[in-house]
C-alpha cells in the first residue's frame, strides 16, 4: 500500500525553508494535497492568536478506502440493533493515528455528551498545571452544597463529605470514577472562560449547562482525543498525564468488554437521560493496538440504558478485530 508520510509535511511546515510554492499555497488555505488527487488533507489550527496559528491536527477529507469494508459491517450491526429495539440510534467515528485514516457512521446524529464534558475540566486543570505544578498537591475539602448534582447510573466511587483531597486525587475521581462531586469541587478552581475557550478552540460549540438541547457529534467531540494524542493542545508532559489518568477509567462494561484482555485503552464514558425515558450512553477511547493506536468514539441512544452497554462492546470488538487483521497483513 502506498503511504503518504505526513511527518514530512509537518517538518516542512515548521521549518519553512524547504517548502515548495505548491505546498505553501495549500497550507495557507488549510489544505494539503495527498498522493491521490482525489483526497486532500485539511489542517486544523488554533486561531486564537494574532500572529501564529498553532497546529492541532491534520485530517484527510475523505474516508480511508481500506476501512470501507469495516464501515459496511458496522453499519449493518447498527441497523440490526435498531431493528431488535436494542438502540434507537448510534454514531461511530474511527481514526487511526499512524496515517490519519478514518471512517464515520451516521455523522449527522447529535447527542448530549453527559460526562464527556469532564474532558473540558481535565484539560482546563492540566493547562493551569503547566505553569504551576504545585496545583496537583493543593488540597480541597468536600462539603455538599445546594448545587444540583446530576444523578448517575455508573459511578463506582464518590467523595466523602468533610474529607480533603488533593487536586491530583480529584482528577482521578472525576475521570476514573466519573464522580460528579469531584467535578463540582474542581470547578471551584477552574477558570470558566478558559473552560469555554477549550471547546471553541477544538471547533466545538460552547457547553451550556442550562441548555437541555446542547449536543455534539461523535466526529467533532473526537477532537479532544486527537489533540491529546498529538500533544498539540496541552504540553507533551500534561498530555501524557491526561492519558495516564484516562487509563484509570474503571468503566469496563462498554468498550473494554469488547477488547482482548490486557489491551491498553485511555477512555471516558458519558451518559444522559430525560424524564421522557430517553437515554444516551457514549464512550470514546484511544486504543493501543501494538504500534498502531487508534481513536474510537461511539455514541448511542435508546429507551433503556442497560441495553446500550452491549452496543459499545459489540462495535468495539468488531472494530478491533478488523484492525488487528489489517495490521497482521501489514496494511
Image (cartoon, grey):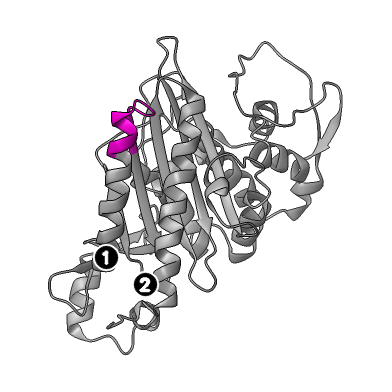
Tag 2, which secondary structure?
loop
Q: Where the C terminus falls, by quadrant?
A: bottom left
Q: Is residue 61 left or right of residue 244?
A: left
Task: Establish if 203 lies above or below 277.
Answer: below
Would you say residue 117 sits in the magenta stretch? no
Residue furthest to the right: 163
Task: Read off the magenta span.
Answer: 79-90
Tag 1, which secondary structure?
loop
Callouts 1 and 2 close, C-beta under 8 Å: yes
Task: Establish if 98 lies above or below 275.
Answer: below
Q: Is residue 7 left or right of residue 120?
A: left
- How many marks the image carries: the answer is 2
Q: Which residue is mark 1?
A: 64
Decide which of 280, 36 is in the foreground and name it: 280
Specify few, some or many for label 2: CA neighbours under 10 Å numbering under 14, 14-19, or 20 or more.
Answer: some
| Residue 41 x/y as whole percent | 25, 67
Q: Which residue is mark 2?
A: 99
Which quarter of the picture shows residue 262? bottom right
Counting residues from the start of the chain, the first of labels 1 and 2 encountered is: 1
At 41% from the left and 19% from the top, the residue drawn is 303
Q: CA distance from mark 1 to mark 2?
A: 10 Å
Residue furthest to the bottom: 18
| Residue 315 x/y as whole percent | 41, 47
Q: Is residue 310 left or right of residue 40?
A: right
| Residue 267 x/y as whole percent | 56, 48
Decide which of 227, 109 is in the foreground and name it: 109
Amino acid at each position: 500500500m502506498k503511504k503518504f508520510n505526513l511527518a514530512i509535511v509537518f517538518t516542512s511546515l515548521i521549518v519553512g525553508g524547504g517548502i515548495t510554492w505548491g505546498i505553501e499555497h495549500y497550507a495557507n488555505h488549510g489544505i494539503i494535497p495527498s498522493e491521490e488527487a482525489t483526497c486532500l488533507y485539511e489542517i486544523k489550527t488554533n486561531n486564537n492568536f494574532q500572529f501564529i496559528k498553532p497546529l492541532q491536527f491534520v485530517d484527510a477529507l475523505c474516508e480511508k478506502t481500506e476501512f470501507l469494508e469495516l464501515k459496511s459491517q458496522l453499519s449493518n450491526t447498527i441497523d440490526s440493533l435498531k431493528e431488535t429495539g436494542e438502540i434507537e440510534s448510534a454514531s461511530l467515528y474511527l481514526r487511526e493515528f499512524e496515517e490519519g485514516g478514518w471512517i464515520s457512521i451516521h455523522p449527522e446524529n447529535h447527542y448530549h455528551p453527559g460526562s464527556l464534558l469532564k474532558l473540558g475540566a481535565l484539560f482546563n486543570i492540566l493547562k493551569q498545571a503547566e505553569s504551576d505544578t504545585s496545583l496537583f498537591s493543593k488540597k480541597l475539602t468536600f462539603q455538599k452544597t445546594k448545587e444540583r448534582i446530576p444523578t448517575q447510573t455508573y459511578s463506582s466511587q464518590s467523595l466523602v463529605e468533610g474529607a480533603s483531597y488533593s487536586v491530583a486525587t480529584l482528577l482521578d475521581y472525576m475521570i476514573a470514577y466519573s464522580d460528579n462531586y469531584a467535578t463540582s469541587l474542581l470547578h471551584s478552581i477552574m477558570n470558566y472562560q478558559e473552560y469555554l475557550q477549550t471547546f471553541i478552540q477544538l471547533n466545538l460549540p460552547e457547553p451550556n449547562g442550562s441548555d437541555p438541547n446542547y449536543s455534539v457529534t461523535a466526529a467533532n467531540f473526537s477532537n479532544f482525543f486527537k489533540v491529546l494524542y498529538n500533544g498539540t493542545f496541552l504540553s507533551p508532559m500534561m498530555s501524557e498525564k491526561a492519558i495516564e489518568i484516562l487509563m484509570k477509567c474503571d468503566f469496563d462494561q462498554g468498550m473494554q468488554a469488547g477488547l482482548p484482555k490486557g489491551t491498553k485503552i485511555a477512555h471516558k464514558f458519558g451518559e444522559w437521560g430525560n424524564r421522557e425515558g430517553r437515554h444516551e450512553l457514549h464512550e470514546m477511547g484511544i486504543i493501543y493496538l501494538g504500534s498502531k493506536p487508534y481513536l474510537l468514539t461511539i455514541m448511542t441512544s435508546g429507551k433503556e440504558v442497560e441495553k446500550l452497554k452491549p452496543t459499545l462492546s459489540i462495535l468495539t470488538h468488531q472494530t478491533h478485530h478488523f484492525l488487528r487483521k489489517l495490521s497482521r497483513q501489514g496494511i
